[in-house]
Structure formats: C-alpha cells, structure tokens
Image (spheres, grey):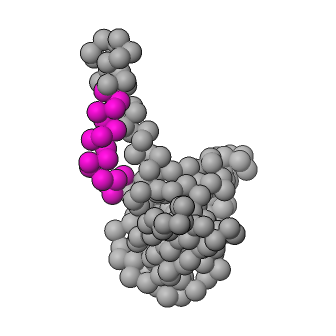
Amino acid sequence: MMDCKRALEEVQGDMDAAVELLRKKGIAKADKRSGRVAGEGLVVSYIHHNGQVGVLVELNCETDFVARTDEFKSLAKDLALHIASADPIGVNPQDVPEDLVASERRIAEEQAEAGGKPEHIREKIVEGKIKKFIAERALTEQLFVKDDSKTVGQLVKEASSTLGEAISIGRFARFRIEIGRAHV
C-alpha cells in the first residue's frame, strides 16, 4: 500500500506513470535477487494435444513455499508450453552451441559478401544476423508465445518480482516425433 502511495506522490498522481514506476522498481528488486541460490522448484511436463511433442522443464526458486504456489506452477506450465512451441536450443544465449553459431556466421558472411556491401557494413550485417539468430534460439531471449510484448527472460523476472524470490530456469528437454523417430 505504502509503495503505491509513494509512487503516486512521486509522479504527481498520474496512475499510469505510477504503475510503470512500480513495475520498474519490481524488476530492479528482481535483479538484486538474481544472485541468490534457487535450490527449490518444480519439474513440469507438457505433452502437445497431438502427442507428437513433449517437454520437461525445471523451474527453480528459493523456497518450497513459493514452488507450491499457483503462480509458480502456472509459470512453469507456461514455460513448458512455450518450449514446445518455440523450440529453443538452450536456456541462455551462452548455451547456444558455438559450432552452430560459427556455422550461422559463415552463412551470414557469405550472404553479406554476395550482396556486394562494403566491408565495414558487412561486419555490422553479420553481427546483427548472429544476434538475431541467438535471440531466436535461446529460451530467455525468445518472445513469449502467449504475450509477444516481452521475452521469456522478462516474464521470469516479473514472476520473481511478484513472488519475492529469485526464480531461474534450470534446464529443459524437448522431445518430438518425426517420421517414426524421436528427436531431443
């Protein structure tokens, strides 16, 4: 209550600005929590309605109390659904395999060279394509399938702010049936 009152006073009564200010402060608090150990959590599964795609996701938090809340369970289910839909390779950008990034870099360089662009512009084009590729393949950088106004990483930070604990995605596995073969 007092945070709301202070926010309204700080923005001279503008409700929309107060909401934005409170959200920003919540994200800042979540950033402070990111160093804490998230040793509790859940493993959640999702099987797509056609039975062809399945996901296991580990979502961590600091206490079993938070892990048992409906909000935390809902976040875990939403993440599993997102993973089934968006097919990420790793949790964070650094989890995208270097050999895959190197392969994409070679392709982007060849495309930029074939386009006849000057050398200094080619480098920027290649870096932009690599950055986009990693954002499309790293779970925390992907746009959330249920609300494309935020990334999965922002969704997790918002949940951390709301629940008052550090929340992190531990790992995931995505299984898919393709022409009689299972792919992980």
Q: What is the quadrant of residue 75 in the picture?
A: bottom right
The reply to whether residue 141 is in sight is: yes
Magenta highlight range = 93-109
- Please identify the quadrant where the C terminus is shown: bottom left
Say which of 112 and 164 sits in front.
112
Q: Nearer the viewer, residue 15 or 179?
A: 179
Q: Residue furthest front?
A: 180
**How many numbered discs?**
0
Residue 10 lies left or right of residue 119; in this view the side is right
Q: Is residue 106 magenta?
A: yes
- What residue appears at the point 73 percent right and 50 percent down from the top-left corner? 15
Q: Position of residue 135 (x, y in %)?
A: 44, 46
102 lies above or below 139 = above
Q: Main secondary structure of the magenta part?
A: helix
- Which x, y percent locates residue 80? 56, 68
Residue 102 placement: quadrant: top left
Q: Is residue 21 above or below residue 78?
A: above
Residue 27 in sight from this viewpoint: no
Taking the spot 44% from the left edge, 39% from the top edge, the residue there is 132
Which residue: 50% across, 74% down?
A: 56
Residue 34 % position (x, y): 39, 66
Give the residue displayed 40% in from the left and 77% down from the top: 38
Image quarter in which the N terminus is found: bottom right
x%, y% of residue 175? 50, 68
Decide: is 27 above or below 78: above
Please say whether residue 35 is one of the residues in the magenta stretch: no
